[in-house]
Amino acid sequence: MKYLRQFSIILLISLIGEVLHNLIPLPVPASIYGLAILFTALAGGILSLDKVKETGYFLIEVMPLMFIPAAVGLLGAYHVLMPILLPYAVITLLSTLLVMFVAGRVTQFMTEEDVQNE
């Protein structure tokens, strides 16, 4: 029952993100609104981490499975992707490396700042 309650909370926040996406005329995906709402609720103490922690861990564990349908969809579009495969691969590689670098630097900055505050 605990997992159902936690999943319901996450779904409710996602629903609020969908509503905001339809109400606010900005090119921001509904999932980003949902993440911002969840982050604000957790950081502001409106929602305690214990209310969503186990289900959040579960969703992170099954996240790789969510990419399988997208990969299969790419296989169906093979004839469209073949002429642009090299530029697509280079852009994907460079953007992945850039994201890894920036995420690593931000993590280092945050952990160093966290150590200094202790």
Image (cartoon, rainbow, N blue to C red):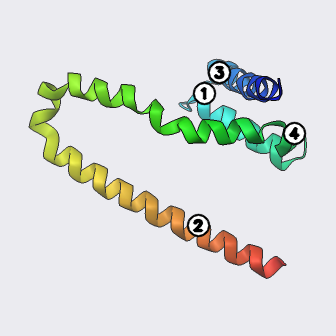
Q: Earlier in the sequence, mark 2 or mark 4?
A: 4
Label 1: which secondary element: helix
Q: Are marks 1 and 3 in contact (CB under 8 Å)?
A: yes
Label 4: which secondary element: loop
The residue at which mark 4 appears reads as 47
Q: Amino acid at mark 1?
A: Ala
Crowding around mark 4 (Cα neighbors within 10 Å: few <14, some 14 to 19, many 20+) is some
Q: Is residue 71 above or below residue 15?
A: below
Q: Position of residue 5 (x, y in %)?
A: 82, 25
Which residue is drawn at the image coordinates 38% and 25% (left, top)? 69
- For the image, the number of numbered tags is 4
> Which callout, 2 or 4, points to the residue nearer the camera?
4
77 horizontally vs 56: left or right: left
Q: Is residue 23 above or below residue 56?
A: above
Which residue is drawn at the image coordinates 90% and 46% (left, top)? 45
**In the depicted view, which residue is nearer to us: 37 or 42?**
42
Q: Amino acid at mark 4?
A: Leu
Determine the CA span between mark 2 and mark 4. 25 Å
Which residue is drawn at the image coordinates 77% and 28% (left, top)? 3
The residue at which mark 2 appears reads as 106
The residue at which mark 3 appears reads as 18
Determine the CA span between mark 1 and mark 2. 25 Å
Q: Amino acid at mark 2?
A: Val
Q: Earlier in the sequence, mark 3 or mark 2?
A: 3
Q: Residue furthest left?
A: 83
Q: Earlier in the sequence, mark 4 or mark 3?
A: 3
Label 3: which secondary element: helix
The residue at which mark 1 appears reads as 30
> Which callout, 4 or 3, points to the residue nearer the camera?
4
In the picture, the quarter occupied by the N terminus is top right
72 horizontally vs 5: left or right: left
